[in-house]
Image (cartoon, rainbow, N blue to C red):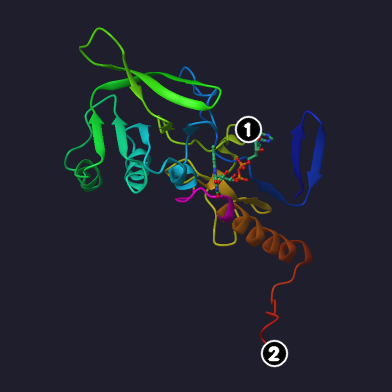
Amino acid sequence: SSKKVYTPEGTFVGRSLVLATGAMGRTSSLQGESEFLGRGVSYCATCDGAFYRQKEVAVYGLNPEAVEEAQFLTKFASTVHWLTNNEPQQEDAHVQVLLSQPNVKHWNFTRLSAIQGNESGVTSILMKTRGESEATSLPVEGVFVYQSGSKPITDYIGPQIAYCENGGVKVDEMMATNVEGVWAIGDIRNTPFQQAVVAASDGCIAAMAIDRFLNQRKGIKRDWDHS
Ligand SMILES: Cc1cc2nc3c(=O)[nH]c(=O)nc-3n(C[C@H](O)[C@H](O)[C@H](O)COP(=O)(O)OP(=O)(O)OC[C@H]3O[C@@H](n4cnc5c(N)ncnc54)[C@H](O)[C@@H]3O)c2cc1C
């Protein structure tokens, strides 16, 4: 059956459809976050961590992504200031490893109130620790925000397809969803490594699978197989 997509530019109809709306579903909510995005504010330590060699950075968040990314940043930053609104689970092995790093300073029960800077980028954050009346300024050059994780953008699909427990669209090894003719690629799958090369690879797999699907070619002979 044909697939129909409604957009402000018009309605598109096709035999196959690729969902690739990414995972930037969380809107910027912190003061200064959108202003300094790409100029000190980042959501990806793997992508931007190396820019902060021997610099002070802050990581804000308590979810597993925040813990993993903070750990990654310890390889580069002089100090990783880890801010958590609540107490991390002390029995979590990843938390224990992170807190044992000599260049990690944990600010427990601490809320990030604002990200500040100038035309060159982030210079400091304002943070408020529970029980203290005044916010404190902390000089940092990078702020990595993992407040609620990156959220796959799927609101326009609703319950029409199946999802994984983590909110990503569920696909098989060909990137096909549970709906025939519909594929999903990239960050919308909530892949463990949200990287451009992973999304591009997904796209390649889906494109080849769709070619098979549209042309009803079941037995494809690999071009290096000359038997
Ligand atoms: C700040 C930042 C820095 C990064 N740096 C790197 C890096 O250095 N190296 C690296 O490999 N990766 C990096 N990444 C990760 C990389 O950008 C993603 O993994 C990759 O872009 C995912 O590709 P995608 O096609 O799945 O989604 P996206 O690139 O997010 O594309 C999704 C597209 O869908 C559009 N869209 C969303 N909703 C709708 C809708 N309802 N209708 C129509 N269109 C819609 C969006 O506007 C967007 O254009 C970075 C990510 C961020 C946020």
Q: Which numbered disc covers residue 224?
A: none
> Which of 57/168 is in front?
57
Q: Residue drawn 32% across and 45% down?
A: 74
- Asked if ligand 1 lies within 8 A of label 1, the reply is yes
Residue at the extreme right of the image, as rendered: 10
Would residue 33 appear left or right of 157 to someone viewing this image? left
Q: Is residue 89 above or below residue 181?
A: above
Q: Dot 1, crowdedness within 10 Å: few (<14), some or many (≥20)?
A: few
Residue tagged 2 = 226
Kind of residue sitting beneath label 2:
His
> Which of 155/133 is in front?
133
Residue tagged 1 = 156
Kind of residue sitting beneath label 1:
Tyr
For the residues bearing labels 2 and 1, Cβ distance under 8 angstroms:
no
Q: Position of residue 57 (x, y in %)?
A: 37, 34
Residue 221 quadrant: bottom right
Would residue 51 appear left or right of 139 to someone viewing this image? right
Residues shaded magenta = 191-197
Q: Is residue 200 above or below residue 37?
A: below
Q: Secondary structure beneath disc 2?
A: loop
Residues under labels 2 and 1: Cα distance?
46 Å
Q: Residue drawn 27% across and 8% down?
A: 134
Q: Quadrant of the C terminus?
A: bottom right
Q: Is residue 151 magenta?
A: no
